[in-house]
Image (cartoon, rainbow, N blue to C red):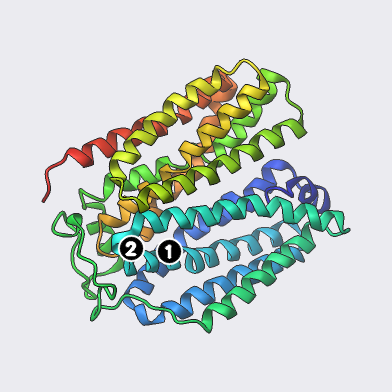
Amino acid sequence: MTFVAVPELERDLGMSTSTALLLLFTLPGAVASLAEPPLLLWADRHPRLRRRLVTGGLALMGAGLGLAAIAPTPWALGLAMTLMFIGNGLGVNLAQATLMDLWPARREQLMTRWVLMGTLGDVCAPLLLAVIALLGGGWRVALGCVAGMCMVHALWLASRPFEAPTDAVAHPRGEPLDEARHGEGDGGHDDDLSMIDVLRMGLRNRALLPWLCAVAMCGLLDEVFVAVASVWLEQAFHASLAQRGFVLGLATFGGVLGLVVLDRALARGVDPRRWLTFTAAASGVGLVVWLAAPTLAWSAAGLFLLEALVAQLYPLVQAQAFRAHDRAVVVEALQGLFAPIDFLLPLAIGFVADRVGVVSALLLLGLQTVGIVVIARRRALAPGP
C-alpha cells in the first residue's frame, strides 16, 4: 500500500524518493531485523504465549499503520512504519512458524498456500487504493482502512482455537520427524542455552545453512527485479507508465497461477526438491528468453510465464529450511541475520545497472536460479544422516 502511494507521500510530507524509501523500508527493516530474532526466540521458549504474541503483533501492525495514516512529518511516518515492521515479525512470522511446527509433513503445500495468500494481497492492495482514491480518499484513508483490518483480524484470531507446539506434545498431528531433524547440529530444546547459543548452533547446522542462503537468494527475483524490469521495459520498448503497470500487473497474476499449479502438484505427491530443481532451472531459461522478446506484447507474455515459475521457488525453499531444523521459530530468527542482504542488494543492483547496463543487472538477478539449482541438487544427492 505504501509503496504504491509513494508519489503522494512525497508530495504531502515533502520527501524525496530516497528519503521515502529510507523511511518506508530501509530504516524500519533494519530495526526490525535487530528486534525480531530475540522476540521470536523468546516466543519459542514460551509456546503457550504464542496466541497473545501473534494477536499482539497483528494489533501492533494495526497501530503502526494507524499512526502512519496520521503522521504529520516524515520521521513520524518512519517511526510508525518501524512499529508496523516489528508487529509483522510477530503477527506474521511467528504465525507462519507455528503453522510449520504443527503440520511438519505438509510444509511445502502450506507454504505454497501461505505465499498465494500474500500474492493475492499484493494484487488487492493497489486495487483497494485505487477504489479509495476514486471515492475521494487518499493514502491516509487507505492506511487507516488496512489498520482497521489488522485490528479486526487480531480480535477475531484471539477468539479462535490456537494450537501451539509444546515440549510435551511436539507434534500434535502425529506426523513423523523429518530426516534432517536427527543430528547435523540442531541441538535439542534446551532452555538453559542463551539466545546467542541457539543462534550459533543453528548456524552450525549443515542441513540448514544452505537453505538459509537459498531463502536469502529468493529476494533477487522479487521487488528488486520488478523495479529493474520496469526500467528495462521503458528502455527496450519505450513503454509508458500505464503499459508498464499493465505488464507488471499481468506478471503478478502469473505468479498466482504458478502457485495454484504448485499446490495441485504437491497434492498429487510430486517430489518437492526435484520440482524445485526443475522450476529453478526453467526460471533461468525463462529469464533469458524474456530478455530476447522482440515486442512489448511478447515481453508481457514472457514475463507472465517467468513469474509463474519464479513464484514457486520461495515456498519450496522456505519449506526445506523449516525441514532442516526441529524448531521453525529458530529458523525464522536465523533468517533475520540475513536481512542486510535485502538492504544492500538494491544498491548493488542499481550500481551494476548504472555502470554496466540494465541487462547485466537482470542477468545478475538471475543468479538466484543458479544458486537454488546448485543447493537443491547438493542437498538432494547428499547421503542421509
Q: CA distance from mark 2 to mark 1?
A: 8 Å
Q: Label 2: which residue?
A: 328
Residue 69 falls in which quadrant of the image? Answer: bottom right
- Percent across and percent down for residue 306 are 51, 32
Q: Closer to the N terminus: mark 2 or mark 1?
A: 1
Q: From this viewpoint, which residue is outermost toward the front?
A: 268
Q: Label 1: which residue?
A: 96
Residue 138 falls in which quadrant of the image? Answer: bottom right
Residue 343 seen in the current view:
yes
Residues 270 and 282: in front is 270
- Percent across and percent down for residue 261 are 45, 45
Helix, strand or loop for disc 2: helix
Instruction: Indicate left or right for 253 with 70 as reference.
Output: left
Determine whether label 2 and label 1 are within 8 Å by CB.
Answer: yes
Instruction: Indicate left or right for 31 with 175 as reference.
Output: right
Instruction: Indicate left or right for 17 with 320 as reference.
Output: right
Q: Residues within 10 Å of mark 2 (few under 14, many from 20)?
A: many
Query: Can you tell which mark lies on residue 273?
Result: none
**Does 370 sit above or below residue 106?**
above
Amino acid identity at mark 1 = Gln
